[in-house]
Image (spheres, helix red, strand yellow):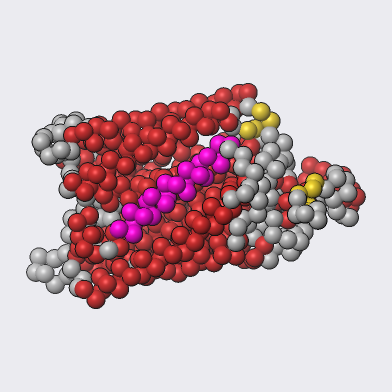
Amino acid sequence: MTTASYVAKTGIFSRPTAKTGLWSWMTTVDHKRIGLMYGATAIVFFVIGGVEALFIRLQLARPENTLVNAHQYNELFTMHGLTMIFLVVMPLGAAFFNYMMPIMIGARDVAFPRLNAFSYWVFLLGGIFLYSSFFIAQAPDGGWFGYAPLSV
Amino acid sequence: MTFYALGLIILGLSSTVAAVNFLTTIINLRAPGMSLMRMPVFVWMTLVVQFLLIFALPVITVALFQLFFDRTLGTNFFSSANGTSDPVLWQHLFWLFGHPEVYILILPAMGIVSEVLPVFARKPLFGYPVVVFSGIAIGFMGWGVWAHHMFAVGLGPVANTAFALSTMFIAVPTGVKIFNWMATLWGGSIRLKAPMLFSLGFIAMFTIGGLSGVTHAIVPSDYQQTDTYYIVAHFHYVLFGGAVFGLFSGIYYWWPKITGKLLNDTIGKLHFWLMIIGFNLTFAPMHILGLQGMVRRTYRYPKGYGFDFWNMISTIGGFTIALSLLVFFYNVYKTRKEGQVAGNDPWDARTLEWTTTSPPPEYNFEEIPVVHALDDFWHRKYVEDKEGRLVPVPSGAQDPGGDQAAHATEAHSEGHGIHMPSQSYMPLLAALGMPLIGWGLTFHQWWLAIVGGLVVLSGLYAWALEPATEE
């Protein structure tokens, strides 16, 4: 069986073909690679959220501690909660959905491979966006549930 | 908090898109013979989670947009000077999303545990249909319990009673699952490998978290617990003791499939024991602190309230968890260098992913498998004799399609002839616009938001226009 008959350049753009290296990962639509990227990213955020938790515990280790002030503490527990929920547990779940679910049902890939890549990149950039708030000292500080009117 | 509103909207978009994708995949792309009631429980839980995501995320997205409008455009959905708005509305919207969200977090772990236990007990999952239907029941009932987060708000006795009852009811399908897992273990020949330890840890810790959850369902008791460390203890027992232990079970279980090498089991056990000891040191004292009245979300506490000792224990526990993670990372490093090669089926497992190579080829299967039963792969390997004992099927005799499969392997070696989707730049390009929109809206730099919007649009148009394949 040959593959040549599949080649059909009908659009105005060409598709990338890198099989190894950075570009192959940035342009991949393979559910297994996307699953791995979800998993790796989630583990990185797990470490970040874990360090935030350690700061919280260090602050609370002794009464009337002064390691962080009230505002920094609010940022720490808010970002710890947001990170662990939205950037660790959900994407780690998504990593397994991505990698394992298609294989477990005997499929070759997910239904919409490019959409799958899109959801990973939006997740990664959303996480970076959330964390960029730290650099300008505007990290969320109202708890992960952001109760009004504190959040408004 | 503008970062909060926009960041969660962006992350919600990602999850919504993924949910649509997985739903379509599970409904449409199952192999021949893979009927719904032959799907592995993990796939079932995936399906339930995607439904929860699709219905829950719009609720929070609406609320987050309203919050953003309140902050940026001066609307008065949740807060205003003259009291015409409703702060409790935010709580309702948030928890109407927030409660299904906690099931979104825990159900994947439940699915993983339901895969791991049968493999390491060498028995079929006890009551497969009941486990599946309890998962679905949790998915439905998860929508009717949100106000138990708001008992202390003052919704009135009728609402509080109704939500207290629904909260107690949702413990039933959860308890059913726990009993099914225990019955799966009963009489099995149990192998205590690292994935199994994490699954057993999941069951034990999640049960403790579930029981403290039932104490919140009793409204007068919840009045005492609201906003204390007792709540913090509870949700860490379900989300760390539950979800994280379940996910680590999955990591240890599927690592050989994903990388081709087995994580070191001894170091894995060390990781488990450090983690579960550290976990209990960290969060069990928070029950006591909470009942003593220590309040959440305060950055310090005075001397002489009796909080000192348990807080110190909790901090020591926190660092023990950190140490256990270092052990895990060392295990990954060591396995990468000198790990034992796994082979296709290192655990003698039951589901389809173990029929292909480790790691699987890009096309997953040379021949799309045909499924004849639940746990199909197991039935290809074992039959039962007259007394119900397992007898391995002699290799080569296993299925009449054996010759055909060997032939097919030859014809398809290295995947020639299997058409896989082509790579694309466009998903990344379209996604790059999202944070630009976010930064633009946060800093009122409208031009930046417009640029971001154009990037998203051009990514999507190019996506639609790019050719179908490239060879």
Please report the residue visible at 30 percent of the width from the left and 44 percent of the height from the top: A79
- Look at the picture and state if B137 lies above or below B295: below
Q: Quadrant of residue B58?
A: bottom left
Taking depth in this image into account, of B43 and B346 the one nearest to the observer is B346
Q: Is A143 inside the magenta-drawn segment?
A: no
Please report the residue visible at 41 percent of the width from the left and 40 percent of the height from the top: A45
Numbered disc total: 0
Instruction: Decide if residue B327 is on the left or right side of residue B362.
Output: left
Q: Is B212 inside the magenta-drawn segment?
A: yes
- Look at the picture and state if B287 lies above or below B62: above
Which residue is most to the bottom?
Answer: B158
Taking depth in this image into account, of B263 and A125 the one nearest to the observer is B263
Observer able to see residue B308: yes
Percent from the top left, x then y, of residue B469? 69, 53
Percent from the top left, x then y, of residue B48? 51, 63
Instruction: Decide if residue A130 is on the left or right side of residue B248.
Output: left
Q: Dominant secondary structure of the magenta stretch?
A: helix
Please report the residue visible at 54 percent of the width from the left and 67 percent of the height from the top: B133
In the image, the segment drawn in magenta is: B193-215
Percent from the top left, x then y, of residue B332? 54, 30
Please report the residue visible at 22 percent of the width from the left and 55 percent of the height from the top: B225
Percent from the top left, x then y, of residue B341? 69, 30
Observer able to see residue B239: no
